[in-house]
Image (cartoon, rainbow, N blue to C red):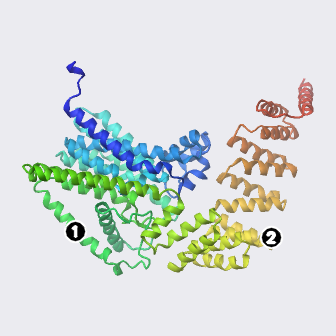
């Protein structure tokens, strides 16, 4: 029986991990009831790449950036979920929570392998699991890339520890490289892993030598390639923020490092968006000036601790290294900071806290039983408070209204929050509330061109074209590369001035705007300008190959007698959904008209097998033509 008993160490580990999983599950349970918000529309709701599990879509997922980022593994995960669950948001949230729970276990195991201390692994993993700063990464479906990249990142680090422990451990070296690649393909922020591998070498007293450098080269090659691709894609997507020169970006970077530490200690006023100062003059804002001084002080403090231990240096460097891609040294995006960026980096700070807590417990409280009781009680209170804050913050991500209302509540001068909330009011047809938010956004920032364009669109939707026009014009004056404003102008002119309307749509498609292709395609078809319509309509279907568009265009060309073009659109519809009996029947008719009788009978029989009830006379006609053509061949 002895062989079947769980030893004390393993039982402690099981209890520790079980506690972490239960508490973290309680903290994140509220997010399961949330819906789709913010970027979820582009990633899931209107992302046709995930709607069909086809080779063409798989190729597109592996080669197409979305929202200025390349993360095909993440998009593939959405495709699998859509295949099983459609557009029900609950399973997407559940998968995010499951990955977060697994990551808690991986953090525990990684820290345990790193320093062999169960209490340190427990505290680090618990803080990782329940801290409110991690809500954005878990509760926001679009941040699947965070929990996924962390999942592969942590496995890669664990494999590297196995590589160092095993003699020889070359298979673990290749596992490390393989999971690193998967991590990069989930989110480019994983490029920091090679530096973390050196950091693990440092922790294990592994000297920098020829071998340790050579073995990292493949990792650095992958990192460099990913970094170059990311910068290139961001520039194409115009996501780069050029508001600050490099010297100023150092102040922004230091501010970010301090900001996350402050929010970690005092997780209040957390929001989905932290904007740059509205005047873009950092030196008018004391926090940006003081931040480098605080960073310098913390660096000196950590360097001082290396006289006694390397643990604080390891945790501090882990935090710094894993944050490097997003601390705005190379400005990307319009937010000075984002909670989601802390998902992996805070492991380093939680590790320092855990080591300090254990050192205090063993050395300062060794013979202070009553103080130990007080510390235990305080620990439970802090844990309960973090779970409470995390649970409440999960509810903020319920929908677009609650999300942006929270940003406005915490930071009332955030113009983008009013603008974004307004767009949700438009979807709910609450135009008065939408206009109020858009006008507030302009009051905060008169050059917010998106708000001008949104006001124009709302007035157009209310048939108030005279009010709409000035706002579209103002939006384009501020930003001439605003495709949605051109589309709205095209819609405004569509009844009164067709040539001008077409010109506006053409300007929008020159900026590669999908809706512009849709509008121009529809305009050409309505004017029966089929030769001009065909290339535009074909391009439209590259952006959005939905069955409705394909069949409508097919019928339009069929009625106009353009059989070749009609056939191409119906076949496109079948490539999206092959189980459309009426479309199979239409293809059968077109093949007959184009004298391809064998294909015609094939599609006819497929339509019948799918439940379509055709005219039997048509089948006789096809068979007669087949017999006639076979006879002529003899």
Residue 271 occupies which quadrant of the picture? bottom left
Q: Secondary structure at mark 1?
A: helix
Which residue is depicted at the point 19% across and 41% down? Answer: 116
Which residue is depicted at the point 14% across and 56% down? Answer: 306
Q: What whole-number distance in Å separates the C-alpha atoms at marks 1 and 2?
A: 64 Å
Q: Is residue 471 above or below residue 542?
A: below
Residue 473 occupies which quadrant of the picture? bottom right
| Of the pair 267 and 455, the residue shown nearer to us | 267
Image x and y of residue 62, in percent? 53, 46
Residue 392 occupies which quadrant of the picture? bottom left
| Of the pair 213 and 568, the residue shown nearer to us | 568
Which residue is depicted at the point 45% across and 71% down? Answer: 242
Q: Residues within 10 Å of mark 2 (few under 14, many from 20)?
A: few
Disc number for residue 296: 1
Q: Secondary structure at mark 2?
A: loop
Q: What quarter of the picture does the C terminus occupy?
A: top right
Judged left or right of residue 405, residue 191 is: left
Disc number for residue 495: 2
Q: Which badge, 1 or 2, is on the more N-terminal residue?
A: 1
Image x and y of residue 55, in percent? 60, 39
Residue 166 can be seen, yes or no: no
Residue 306 can be seen, yes or no: yes
Q: What quarter of the picture does the N terminus occupy?
A: top left
């Amino acid at each position: 029986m002895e062989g079947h008993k769980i030893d004390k160490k393993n039982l402690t580990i099981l209890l520790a991990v079980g506690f972490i999983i239960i508490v973290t599950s309680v903290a994140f349970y509220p997010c399961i009831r949330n819906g789709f918000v913010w970027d979820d529309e582009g990633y899931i709701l209107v992302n046709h790449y995930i709607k069909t599990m086809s080779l063409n879509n798989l190729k597109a997922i592996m080669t197409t950036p979305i929202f200025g980022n390349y993360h095909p593994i993440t998009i593939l995960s959405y495709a699998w979920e859509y295949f099983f669950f459609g557009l029900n948001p609950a399973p997407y949230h559940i998968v995010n929570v499951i990955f977060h729970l697994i990551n808690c276990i991986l953090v525990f195991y990684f820290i345990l392998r790193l320093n062999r201390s169960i209490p340190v692994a427990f505290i680090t993993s618990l803080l990782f699991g329940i801290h409110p700063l991690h809500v954005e990464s878990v509760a926001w479906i679009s941040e699947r890339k965070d929990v996924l990249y962390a999942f592969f990142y942590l496995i890669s680090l664990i494999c590297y520890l196995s590589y160092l422990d095993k003699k020889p451990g070359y298979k673990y070296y290749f596992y490390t490289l393989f999971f690193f690649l998967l991590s990069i393909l989930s989110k480019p922020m994983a490029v920091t892993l090679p530096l973390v591998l050196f950091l693990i070498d440092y922790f294990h007293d592994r000297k920098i030598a020829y071998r340790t450098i050579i073995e990292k080269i493949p990792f650095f090659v992958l990192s460099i390639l990913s970094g170059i691709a990311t910068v290139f894609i961001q520039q194409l997507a115009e996501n780069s923020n050029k508001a600050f020169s490099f010297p100023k970006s150092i102040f922004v970077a230091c501010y970010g490092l301090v900001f996350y530490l402050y929010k970690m200690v005092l997780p209040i006023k957390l929001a989905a968006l932290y904007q740059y100062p509205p005047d873009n003059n950092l030196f008018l804002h004391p926090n940006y000036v003081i931040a480098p001084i605080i960073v310098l002080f913390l660096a000196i403090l950590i360097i001082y601790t290396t006289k006694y231990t390397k643990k604080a240096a390891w945790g501090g460097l882990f935090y710094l290294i894993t944050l490097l891609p997003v601390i705005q040294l190379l400005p990307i995006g319009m937010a000075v900071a984002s909670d989601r960026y802390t998902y992996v980096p805070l492991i380093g700070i939680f590790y320092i806290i855990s080591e300090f807590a254990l050192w205090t417990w063993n050395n300062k409280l060794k013979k202070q039983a009553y103080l130990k009781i007080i510390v235990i009680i305080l620990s439970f209170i802090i844990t309960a408070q973090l779970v409470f804050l995390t649970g409440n913050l999960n509810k903020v991500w319920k929908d677009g209204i609650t999300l942006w209302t929270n940003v406005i509540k915490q930071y009332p001068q955030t113009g983008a929050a009013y603008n974004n909330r307004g767009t949700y009011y438009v979807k709910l047809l609450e135009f008065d509330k939408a206009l109020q938010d858009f006008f507030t956004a302009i009051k905060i920032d008169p050059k917010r061109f998106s708000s001008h364009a949104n006001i124009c669109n709302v007035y157009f939707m209310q048939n108030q074209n005279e009010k709409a026009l000035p706002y579209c014009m103002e939006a384009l004056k501020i930003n001439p590369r605003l495709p949605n404003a051109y589309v709205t102008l095209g819609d405004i002119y569509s009844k009164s001035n067709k040539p001008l309307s077409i010109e506006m749509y053409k300007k929008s498609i020159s900026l590669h705007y999908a809706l512009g292709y849709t509008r121009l395609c529809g305009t050409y078809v309505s004017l029966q300008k089929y030769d001009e319509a065909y290339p535009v309509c074909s391009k439209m279907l590259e952006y959005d190959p939905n069955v409705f568009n394909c069949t409508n265009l097919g019928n339009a060309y069929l009625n106009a007698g353009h059989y070749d073009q009609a056939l191409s659109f119906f076949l496109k519809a079948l490539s999206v959904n092959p189980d459309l009996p009426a479309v199979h029947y239409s293809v059968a008719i077109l093949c007959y008209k184009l004298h391809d009788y064998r294909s015609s009978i094939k599609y006819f029989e497929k339509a019948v097998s799918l439940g379509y009830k055709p005219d039997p006379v048509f089948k006789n006609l096809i068979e007669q033509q087949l017999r006639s053509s076979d006879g002529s061949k003899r």
